[in-house]
Amino acid sequence: ENFIIARSSKVVLIGLVRIVDRRLRIGGALLNVGGISLVSVLPEWRRKGVCSLLMKKAHALMKDRGKDMAVLYGRRAMDGFYTRYGYCGIGLYIDLEVNATQNCRGRLKCVSFKGTREQSQFVMRFYKKEYYSLTGSIVRTPKIWQYLFAQIKERSRKPQLFLFFEGKNPAGYCLIREDKIIELSLSKKHYEDFLVFLNSLKISALSIHPEHPFFRYCRSRISTTILKERFVLNGGYMARLINPGSFISKLGPSLAQRAEMLGLGNKTLKVLGQKIFLRDGKVKTTREVSDIYFRDSNLAVRVLLGASHLESTWDIRWNEKKTWIPSLWSGMHFYTSIWDEI
């Protein structure tokens, strides 16, 4: 039921799109997401509107199924292709180069992942503990985990997964791909020992969530770090809204928490036909003039996800009487592990 196919008048298969069901955590909200995958049309049928019909059908089906948002991963060769279907880049790509020179006694014991049931449950538990509090984390079902673990065993340029123990007690894990740490769950008391492990593997770059405790630790403690950060607007991770009302309703409580911290609990915010009461995060449909104006409505997804700051995004204006609006999204940092590419 998640495959949408196109056939010619001769009933020959000429194209298909697959919808991948996912759940995504954004600032405490749990969103229903439809991942777009396997977009393909036979060469002789391209530029004839086949892909447009497939994508239109996929979006209509997602809306009927109550999806809040559609996401996809656009390869570099396809930069600019998916913008025609309403998608906007949400990818924040971060590399932190770390000069790790600490010498510790190395209390951590490290073992390679062997794929046992016990090890798999260990990794799943630590991911949930570390990442579910970070904006952009994907809720990984047992089937998703099964697929990711299979990558470790079967891919030619496979990621490396290491497990850590303190004595006999599980302490965490890390995932390495292309000489970078791309996922990590570890107790803070082991951070210095982990740096020794990085030195032994000659790993000096992190590509993890910018709000991850270890990322912040490296920025504040290591003598030399170099941060490389870039957005990709026309490729990489991309998204579009499917049901703006339900999307904003789920984000409402998170915005209310932020508003409470800023002393804005008595304010309201109107955006995309929805009115958010910042005292409690409740949302209702409204015909009142919006407080945020998007020249291209597709850019709304970047702001609402916290993928970029309102003040640094072009083609967006907001109600000048509500000067506090940009502060509601300050520092949300949308970021998904590259192990979760659709």
Image: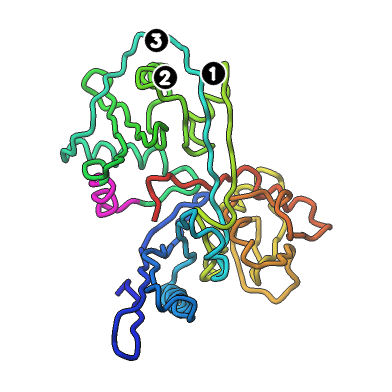
Vertical side of 66 occupied by 73: above or below: above
Residue name at image x 55 percent, y 19 percent: 221
Distance Cα–Cα, label 3 vs label 1 = 14 Å
Residue name at image x 75 percent, y 71 percent: 289
Distance Cα–Cα, label 1 vs label 2 = 10 Å
Vertical side of 220 occupied by 259: above or below: below
Extreme front residue here?
44
Q: Dots 2 and 3: beta carbons under 8 Å? A: yes
Where does the image place residue 263, in percent across and percent down from the top left? 71, 46
Disc 3 secondary structure class: loop
Most prominent secondary structure in the magenta stretch? helix
Disc 1 secondary structure class: loop
Name the mark on residue 104. Answer: 3
Instruction: Write down the region rendered in magenta.
Output: 140-150
Judge whether residue 280 can be spotted in this image: no
Q: Which residue is mark 1?
A: 222
In the image, 73 versus 281, the foreground residue is: 73
Name the mark on residue 195. Answer: 2
Of the numbered discs 1 and 2, the one sitting upstream in the chain is: 2
